Amino acid sequence: MLIRADQLQARLDSGLRGPYMVFGDELLLVNEAVDAIRAAAQAAGYGVREQHQVERGFDWDELLAQSREMSLFGERKLIEVRIPTGKPGRDGAQALAALAQEASSDVLVLVLLPRLDAAAQKSDWFSRLAEAGTAVRVDTVEPEQLGAWMRARLARHGLRIAAGPAGQACLDLLVARTEGNLLAAHQEVEKLALLLDPGELDPAQVEDLVQDAARYGVFRLGEALLAGDIARLVRMLDGLQGEGVAPVLAHWSLAEETRAWLRLRQGLDAGESFATLARANRIWGPKEKLLQRALPRLNLPLLEGLLLRAAECDRAVKGLRPAGVPHQPWEAVRHLALAMAQAVSPQPAASAHGARLVLLAAG
């Protein structure tokens, strides 16, 4: 069955129907669809995940053999096959058709593809996979559709755009902030959901929040982190605190930075180019060069660990007092910033010691 990405969750809620294909070029929405399938698979007992990147010389026979084998402890497994070109070739087409025919309740296959033209969607391998399971089409959100998209995303968080000219002005302000970029639109929505209580958005309040984020430079924290400039980072955090910026806004900026690093690491591991990933994630200028130098030190487990730290910091900022994290909100933010700085530093031991001294002096 061929479905749109916005229909996926309802279909997953009624049960898994694999194999799955997810195809499209809208990175944010592709990742959301893939994450939803992974979560549903894990909940259904698929405890093993295998990932395969199709490139020149890829062994399709080995993939088929692995799909027919049970895991070491008899666990159900999810097999992900990423085809960056969208063209599996003759051997790949035959293997994908075989995977569709041999669908098993113990093995769930997920094929990841870029946007496909009409001819590719009429190919035998695509048709067989779609008929056997679920093909998820991720449509590009055009700039003129961003307003409606943001309105719907805000509604998920219980935030409503007011009716009339004032509400439209509020939405226009948010759309203008995104510069036609879906990831930026997503970040604006997440920031508002973090900072505001559910209800109708007040245009003046939204404008103040947008201006605060720009005025106090929370978006420059990532550049200080990547430069390894701990002293500057601490000064920036102290300045934000002194100006009365909510710690939740500083945390949001650090968490978004972590998620961006993770997206780039995943993309690089999947064979995508750094330049393409940087453009898709709105990273340019000095920060682009700094991140390119830092990424070789940022492996997937390390970044996933930082994301967990960001989640713990989020709880502390909200007053939930998680174990192992300073309970004072701004100290929790500094704690997260230090962990991120240590991860980026080419000499973690020495940098960590110096950073601790600076943070203690600042606290």
Image (cartoon, rainbow, N blue to C red):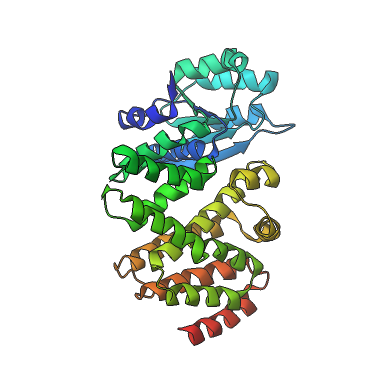
Residue closest to the eye, 95 or 224: 224
Residue at x 27%, y 54% (from the top left corner)? 197
Residue at x 64%, y 33% (from the top left corner)? 84
Residue at x 54%, y 39% (from the top left corner)? 180
Residue closest to the eye, 16 or 312: 312
Q: In the displayed structure, would residue 96 be above or below residue 313?
A: above
Residue at x 50%, y 64% (from the top left corner)? 215
Q: In the displayed structure, would residue 190 be above or below residue 2?
A: below
Residue 285 spot, x, y in % from top left? 68, 55
240 vs 351, left or right, is left
Can residue 204 be seen in the rendering of this structure?
yes
Q: In the displayed structure, would residue 235 be above or below residue 209?
A: below
Residue 113 spot, x, y in % from top left? 58, 29
Residue closest to the eye, 81 or 331: 331
Q: In the displayed structure, would residue 281 be above or below residue 257?
A: above
Q: Which residue is outermost to the right?
A: 56
Residue 321 spot, x, y in % from top left? 31, 70
Can residue 324 be seen in the rendering of this structure?
no
The picture quadrant where one finds residue 97 is top right
